Image (cartoon, rainbow, N blue to C red):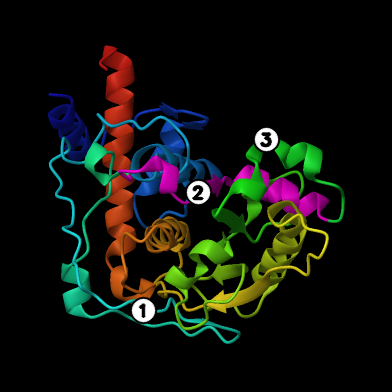
């Protein structure tokens, strides 16, 4: 019943206020899920909460919201293909963008939601994943060079195998929302790096994903390096620490000026799937041009369902 109400709300354009774990999305911000709007900090954080509590709950050491699945929203999960060869995400100092084939687009699900069957079956062997929201990332960028151990200690970064950080190009300490572009910075420990970059499997690394320029130039790339340098000692706190490498990665390129936030969420989801061994396709294969639009629809449906559940008191 709630899923049907959510679909009806979508059709009539009803915008809810959504409160989900540590994130609150206002009615106005929820409307930004419609193109051609640019994602706010809260929407990116909401997308990360969805990934943490629904798609990768076991790996994130959180309680899964196993009853808020896309199956109940009427969408169909993609059947994972087997027997595929591992392919690289395209790690190199000179990032190159690219498209995807129609076959790859057809193999991509319309949404990835909460479903117990999607979670890792053996939590003891799960790679440990963390999604760092935009406000925390902005704080790290602004205080880089200062000791961060006390501030970020609760995140237990040294115990994480995959860390996804959402970065905007804003450098305004008073208005974090003043930026105009989102990119993704991902840390991969050496235990999972080979799954994402099989052509260059050695050591821990930071990968920077930019759907607009390839991540090689500009202020946002400089900011990504700054944040990576600040987080590195907390991620790999050893006496002989020399630092993970920083690489710009091939990223599916957006075809407009407003889908960067949606691409951040799509890329973060697939990088984690690769690191966890759930999907062997490269990013360029896995994220079709329609991917960001489908991500917007997924979050809108999920947000409406969360709002309706809160309003009705349903479990």
Q: CA distance from mark 2 to mark 3?
A: 14 Å
Label whose residue precedes the other's in the sequence (3 or 1): 1
Q: Is residue 115 visible?
A: no
Q: Which residue is mark 3?
A: 154
Q: CA distance from mark 3 to mark 1?
A: 34 Å
Neighbours of disc 1 within 10 Å: few (<14), some (14-19), many (20+): some
Residue 136 falls within the magenta-colored stretch: yes
Q: Which residue is mark 2?
A: 129
| Farthest residue, direction right | 146
Identify which residue is drawn at 43% across, 55% down. Answer: 265
SS state under label 2: strand
Question: Looking at this view, is 158 or 150 the one in front?
Answer: 158
Label whose residue precedes the other's in the sequence (1 or 2): 1
Q: Is residue 233 visible?
A: yes
Label pair 2/3, CB-CB below 8 angstroms = no
Using residue 192 as the reference point, say whether residue 221 is left or right of it. right
Using residue 89 as the reference point, say whether residue 294 is left or right of it. left
Residue 89: quadrant of the picture: bottom left
Q: Which residue is mark 1?
A: 87
Which residues are the magenta region? 120-144
Label whose residue precedes the other's in the sequence (2 or 3): 2
């Amino acid at each position: 019943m709630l899923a049907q109400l959510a679909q009806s709300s979508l059709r009539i354009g009803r915008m809810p206020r959504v409160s989900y774990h540590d994130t609150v999305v206002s009615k106005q911000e929820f409307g930004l899920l419609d193109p051609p709007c640019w994602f706010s900090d809260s929407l990116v954080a909401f997308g990360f909460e969805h990934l943490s509590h629904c798609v990768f709950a076991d790996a994130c050491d959180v309680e899964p919201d196993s009853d808020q699945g896309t199956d109940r929203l009427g969408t169909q999960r993609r059947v994972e293909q087997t027997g595929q060869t591992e392919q690289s995400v395209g790690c190199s100092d000179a990032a190159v963008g690219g498209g995807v084939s129609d076959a790859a687009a057809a193999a991509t699900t319309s949404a990835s939601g909460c479903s117990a069957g999607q979670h890792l079956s053996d939590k003891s062997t799960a790679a440990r994943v963390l999604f760092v929201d935009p406000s925390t990332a902005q704080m790290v960028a602004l205080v880089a060079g200062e000791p961060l151990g006390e501030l970020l200690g609760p995140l237990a970064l040294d115990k994480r195998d995959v860390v996804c950080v959402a970065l905007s190009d804003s450098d305004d300490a008073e208005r974090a929302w003043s930026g105009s572009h989102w990119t993704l910075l991902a840390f991969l420990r050496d235990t999972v790096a080979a799954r994402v970059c099989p052509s260059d499997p050695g050591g821990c690394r930071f990968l920077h994903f930019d759907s607009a320029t390839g991540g090689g130039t500009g202020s946002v790339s400089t900011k990504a390096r700054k944040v990576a340098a600040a987080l590195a000692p907390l991620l790999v706190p050893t006496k002989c620490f020399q630092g993970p490498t920083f690489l710009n990665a091939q990223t599916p390129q957006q075809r407009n000026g407003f889908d960067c936030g949606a691409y951040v969420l799509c890329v973060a989801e697939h990088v984690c799937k690769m690191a966890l061994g759930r999907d062997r396709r490269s990013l360029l294969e896995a994220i079709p041009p329609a991917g960001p639009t489908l991500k917007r629809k997924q979050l809108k449906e999920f947000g409406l369902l969360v709002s309706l559940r809160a309003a009705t008191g349903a479990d």
